[in-house]
Image: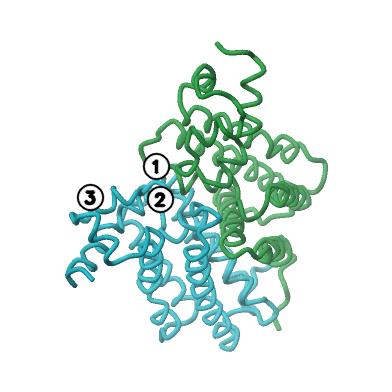
Chain colours: A cyan, B green
């Protein structure tokens, strides 16, 4: 094992390399150069580039603060709005042109990287599961119509968020992210509230 | 210039390499090996890997059959349903685990590949623009509430589709795609129909 201080340094300083270049675009040489550590030290701490990427996915999912989302005292829709606002602030802080690590890895990891793909899949499943838990609370509290499948809606909302981030990344236009928030919280979810449907014209 | 037959062969046989490995993961050596042409021939036909990738993006967007979508005689929502069904069939035919070329490139192309990013952005803009045109027809034909911003909803639907494909790719579960169709056509759009809002409980 190398010096204990090297491992956090390797993790801290390689996040942006993966984010900006993608999994395939980030070579071990790029990663150790960004971290400022010798290549040998890298392999003292991580068995492979894939193992470091898995560590980043776990940290990224932890940073989504899914506990705050699930345990929020706010109304369910308000808790979701605050959650996605936090996600957008975090993506904006690291540059919308870099997208979302989980989203980038979901499309950019080669099919044979099974461990990394499993970590990405587990991250999405935890995220969608937490959103679904809030949507089920919304149903109990009569904020969301009971007949709507909470798991499917959760998958839909997370997918729409990821799609908006990808469009914002591709186009350089943050309007896609604004459109996601407007559509979700001003159009889509309000029309799913019991007894609060807009009147016929 | 090389032999005319080489160029279509290079294009036909490299699509799956880009799809499965991503832009960064597909090297020129991989591409010429898959195409069965000498490396020198590659550069007779394409200035760079990026130029070939741009060609694939243009063909991919052409294969979305956006004219069929816009000119469909079906009701607007039915035309959209048929369009996304065609998209899902096409993605399934090339393997859901490979995702969507446009979506993969939207998250996986390095930020400094300006020409390719512009082609991806233009592809998304054409796709979203065609969906928006159908949504505006839906408004004229009283299928969609007139106060909804068609451009924002189009961006949202395309984003949700891309997110669902990415989740299906990451997880290996086609249920994410089914959830997209169910949510869009059974839950989200029906609640945006004028005078057809569900009654209060």
Q: Position of residue B146 (x, y in %)?
A: 64, 53
Q: Say whether residue A57 is left or right of residue A16.
A: right
Q: Name the residue beneath numbered marker 2.
A: A22
Q: Name the residue beneath numbered marker 1.
A: B110
**Badge 1 vs badge 2, beta-carbon distance below 8 Å:** yes
Pick whichever of labels 3 and 2 is earlier in the sequence. Answer: 2
Question: On the rendered image, what quadrant is the N terminus of chain A found in?
Answer: bottom left
Q: How far separated are the C-alphas under marks 3 and 2?
A: 16 Å
Quarter of image, res A8: bottom left
Height in image: A114 above or below A33? below
Q: Identify the residue at image location x=49%, y=80%.
A: A76
Q: Position of residue A165 (x, y in %)?
A: 45, 54
**Badge 1 vs badge 3, beta-carbon distance below 8 Å:** no
Q: Position of residue A135 (x, y in %)?
A: 56, 79
Element carrying mark 1: loop
Q: How far separated are the C-alphas under marks 1 and 2?
A: 7 Å
Image disc number at residue A33: 3
């Amino acid at each position: 094992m190398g010096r204990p201080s090297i491992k956090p340094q390797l993790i801290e300083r390689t996040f942006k390399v993966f984010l900006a270049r993608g999994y395939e675009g980030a070579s071990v040489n790029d990663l150790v150069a960004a971290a400022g550590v010798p290549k040998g030290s890298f392999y003292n701490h991580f068995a492979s580039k894939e193992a470091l990427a898995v560590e980043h996915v776990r940290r990224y999912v932890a940073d989504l603060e899914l506990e705050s989302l699930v345990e929020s005292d706010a109304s369910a829709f308000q808790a979701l709005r605050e959650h996605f606002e936090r996600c957008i602030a975090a993506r904006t802080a690291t540059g919308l042109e870099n997208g979302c690590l989980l989203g980038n890895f979901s499309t950019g990891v080669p099919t044979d990287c099974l461990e990394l793909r499993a970590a990405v899949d587990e991250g999405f499943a935890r995220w969608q599961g937490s959103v679904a838990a809030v949507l089920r609370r919304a149903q109990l509290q009569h904020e969301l119509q009971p007949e709507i499948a909470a798991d499917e809606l959760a998958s839909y909302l997370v997918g729409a968020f990821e799609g908006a981030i990808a469009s914002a990344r591709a186009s350089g236009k943050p309007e896609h992210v604004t459109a996601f928030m407007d559509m979700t919280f001003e159009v889509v979810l309000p029309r799913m509230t019991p007894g609060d449907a807009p009147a016929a014209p």
